[in-house]
Amino acid sequence: MKITIISSENPYPPIHGGRIDIWNRLRFLSSLGFKIQLIYWDNLQAINSELKNYVLNYRIIKKNKYNLLPYLFYPFGVATHVPCKDEVEKVLEEISIYNPDLVLFEGIYSYPLLKSVKKQFPQKLLFYRSQNIEFKHMFDQVKSSDKVVIKLRYFVDSIRMFYCERKMRITCDKVLDITKEDNEFWKNKNSIHLPPILDVDFTDNSNERNEPTDIDILFAGNLNNQNNLGGLFWFIKNVLPLLKRNNYSVVFAGSNPSKELIEKIKNEPIKLIANPISMDLSYNRSKILINTNRNVNGINIKMINMLATGKKIVSTKSATRGIPLELKKQILIGDNEVQFAELINISLNNYDDKINQTQIELTKKYFTDNSIQQLKKIFIERS
């Protein structure tokens, strides 16, 4: 069976939630025997050697930087993915030559190719992987930001994004929602819940106990994402003062730390680990993990990875969205600064280095066993 994946970004290296979701699914589809053609947007014109192990052929589309017209009609992220006419024709030609059984659009930012692919291949099965309720996510950015210009941009973009999402969901034969909550929100007859797949290798590596636990409190995630930053700024301003007297070791680890974050922690007792190749080392060195995100739509992929470590987790309620109730019970939830700080204090005061095996097994149950079973059902029976 042949599948063309049109991905909104390069899935490798899988350094944040969206990429992790695409990467793990791509690898598993390959292991099932699917022959994969990968089309993705990236400014780098060379494919990673690791990615080549899983795809039969590929095409890289450069992101739009110079054509300003799409920015008048599309949300910013979608506008950067609008290819020129010649590029569209080349993509369609390569898909035609490959002649896949189905086409999978990974993420809403692949939207600019939807109309052309549908028109050129009206008989092909089209699937869309929705990682989020994107227009709601953008509207949450309005609440997270304190700058008027940014608020206005996200407000306008949220309206435009609603149109893109609605069109994508109506046009595609099957929509694969990342959470049950997203699936219930849209109520599309052609949509189905497909949880993200947990990387089994990740759980194995994360539980190797060779490093000393010299980090008391760890946040691991994208350090440039507006929602993540909003949660971290809340932690710095409201939670950290309640913890300072205990002289805890606090670390923020993740990709592309923003200048604003770097500035805010300059005079705080927080260590920054920027762009780590892997989070495994940071997880292994940590006593407790925190998730401070206060505006989550879809599911927080990093929460799944955190759960798979078996470590103690302190989180906001919002960051547990999409986590099954049985597994959510393993998380300590504090939704205001006093509760959050108190749970950290209690966890560290009573710390032992035992790994929570129940937490690990439940994570594998919901995000490995169940996810793989659902993926097989969707792709093998439907294709």
Image (cartoon, rainbow, N blue to C red):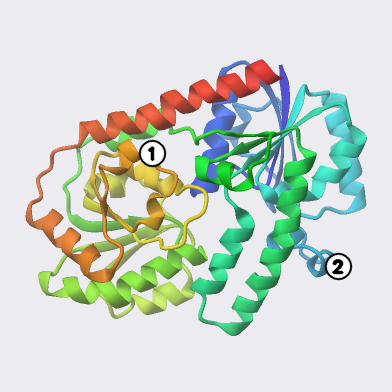
Identify which amino acid the numbered label 1 is placed on: Pro
Residue indicated by mark 1: 324
The correct choice, above or below, for 377 with respect to 326 in the image is above
Horizontal side, residue 365 vs residue 270: left or right: right
- Of residues 17 and 323, the one drawn nearer to the viewer in this rendering: 323
Horizontal side, residue 264 vs residue 145: left or right: left
Q: Position of residue 320 (x, y in %)?
A: 38, 50
Q: Position of residue 32 (x, y in %)?
A: 58, 17
Q: Residues within 10 Å of mark 2 (few under 14, many from 20)?
A: few
- Disc 2, disc 1: CB below 8 Å? no
Horizontal side, residue 292 vs residue 341: left or right: right
Q: Position of residue 113 (x, y in %)?
A: 81, 45
The secondary element bearing badge 1 is classed as loop
Q: Position of residue 134 (x, y in %)?
A: 62, 55
- Of residues 127 and 348, the one drawn nearer to the viewer in this rendering: 127
Identify which amino acid the numbered label 2 is placed on: Leu
Q: Work out whether residue 2 can be spotted.
A: yes
Residue indicated by mark 2: 69
Q: Work out whether residue 179 can be spotted.
A: no
Q: Quadrant of residue 306?
A: top left
Q: Residues within 10 Å of mark 1 (few under 14, many from 20)?
A: some
